[in-house]
Amino acid sequence: MQRYLEEFEREQVVKRLRLFRWVVLGVGILIMFRFWQLQIFQGAKWRILATENQFRKVRVLAGRGFILDRKGRVMAKNRPGFNLAVIPADVNQKTIDLLAGTLNARAQDLAERIKSGRRWSPFVPVTIKENLSWEETSQLEEHFRDLSGVDIEYRPIREYPQSEVACHVLGYIGEMSPLELEQPEFASYQMGDYMGKAGVEKLFEKWLRGKDGYKFKMVDAQGRERPPSIIPGVIFKAKEPAAGKDVRLTIDLDLQELAGSLLKDKAGSIVMLSVKDGKVLTMANSPTFNPQVFGNPFHPEEWRKLETDPSHPLYNRAVQGMYPPGSTFKVIDALAGLQEKVVDPDQKLRCKGVYYFGGIPFKCWRKGGHGAIALANAIIQSCDIYFYQLGHRLGVDRIAQYANLLGLGMKTGIGFPNESGGLIPTSAWREKVRGEKWHPGDTISVAIGQGFVLVTPLQAAVLAMVIANEGELFKPVILEEIQGVPAQELNKYAAKMIQKVNFSPDTWKLVKTAMSEVVSNPSGTAYWGARSDKVKIAGKTGTAQVVKAKRFEGMSEKDIPVKFRDHAWFIAYAPADNPRVAVSVLVEHGGHGASAAAPLARTMIEKYMELYASDQLPKSEKLSKP
């Protein structure tokens, strides 16, 4: 029995050994098969994944294109800068604590920013600190071996050499917001990227931005950079960034700087256009701001000051500001009256200083009146009573029709974001918007550029341009050329005539002659303010009421609080006999156009004649960065 049990146990052991041998053989075959699968069949795949785990693809940012004036002088450029960036997936708490100490920041704030970056991609760099100082850079390099997933990346920093000069034209750049990053049109941007937010920077963002490149760096398991090694069969090709295109504007920097100095300590705008094609030579606004505030690095405190400043320095008055044009609007009445034949240019109307309509007195700016006066002299001396009567004969709808023909009441098409269209009222407009019938008495105010009439300084310059070239209405343009971009691609921004206003030669002649005498005739309203010994100027003054005159009747201008003083206007073109440039000047609460605005226009025109003595503007020069 004992022997039988021993043999039985031996047989069981043999069976178990045999089973174990087959199990070991099977496992061995499976392991060998897996080795073959990983090493041979999937070898290339895992080799790439292992390599990618060792290497990081790093963006190399492209510099924005330069912005130049018409003569190739730099108005916006870049300088080298360095930012601190981290890869969210590689960052640990030790790194966050070290960074907080080095940057004098709260660890919690850094962690929150890294967390928000992980939302987009754990392997996309998140910018922690912009524009590192040399001290910060050296401290970070000292601790670099202890920092996980940290990189110091090159980032071009936008600079504006002339600071506040042309700030509203150039605009500014700013960091992409989370809301913008979610929009399809910004799919190629990443968190921390900058883009144009206003002005030319925004208008030509497509070309100014450039195309980023990339390079590869080798990292260890903690995401720390280490010296590269050669991996057989693996080749990484870097891509060089392509800088943005240089944009050359129609702006003349000399004229722009002069306009800025003339508006110093004032609120207002100066616009100068080429009469021949509508190119903008100057577009200055005041108050101004430093566009560097919005760049890299961003200065939130300074931005808040600008945003809450009651003088609204961020406001581009030239294209966004809407003001009653005052007596500059009288030239439209004159053109409309002549074309519609509702006035005989030789007929004299009597001005006694006050005109009663519907029992309501409407006063002339000259208390004693102008006496018997015909159309030309009514323009020269800016007689309100004459144009009250002419406006009544025309009616508001015909006045609006001619104002629209001459470029008012609609956007100019220059392309700047948030451009205002102004307002030229009609009887239909009042009924639709205000639910009221148009009252003929309201036409009296419209006729002298008051009431509901509103224009922008750019529109006022366009009006002067159209009169100067006798009906050729050009779209004002700011772009001269973009480096390497075909003209047909930029057709949207090219100079072009919108329409030709075909008034009779006699109509143009009378109004233009009168505008010339506004400046050259001793009885003209701009004789003392705009007359020049260097060039013959034609123009029209305007003084636009801000509040009802009765409130301050009998008070001298200096005793009226500044915010209640009239706006001062002057529109002009020169030379009067062969127009080349048109100008509009607005000085908010400046008082009389003849004294506050006309001298500024004269100075601008004289400077233009000094710079461009020949009969033509200089032809485009080859675009190149200094």
Image (cartoon, grey):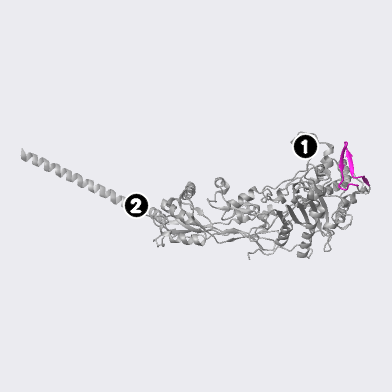
Element carrying mark 2: helix
Badge 1: residue crowd in 10 Å (few <14, some 14–19, many ≥20): some
Whether 604 is drawn above or below 399: the answer is below
Element carrying mark 1: helix
Is residue 316 left or right of 546 when viewed as pictured?
left
Q: In the image shown, does 193 or 12 lie closer to the viewer?
A: 193
Q: Which residues are magenta?
A: 348-368
Q: In the image shown, does 200 or 38 lie closer to the viewer?
A: 200
Q: Is residue 620 magenta?
A: no
Q: Is residue 358 magenta?
A: yes
Is residue 127 left or right of 261 when viewed as pictured?
left
Say which quarter of the image contains residue 483: bottom right
Whether 532 is drawn above or below 337: the answer is below
Residue carrying label 2: 38
- Residue 114 lies, in percent from the top left, at 47, 49
Numbered tag placed on residue 600 in the rendering: none
Q: How many marks?
A: 2
Whether 594 is drawn above or below 254: the answer is above
- Residue 533 lies, in percent from the top left, at 84, 63
Q: CA distance from mark 2 to mark 1?
A: 80 Å
Examine the rendering and report whether any part of residue 275 can be seen: no
Q: Residue at x 77, y 53 (%)?
A: 584
Are the residues at dot 2 and dot 1 in contact (C-beta closer than 8 Å)? no
- Residue 338 lies, in percent from the top left, at 88, 47
Residue carrying label 1: 430
Say what amino acid the circle numbered 1 marks: Arg
Say which quarter of the image contains residue 447: top right
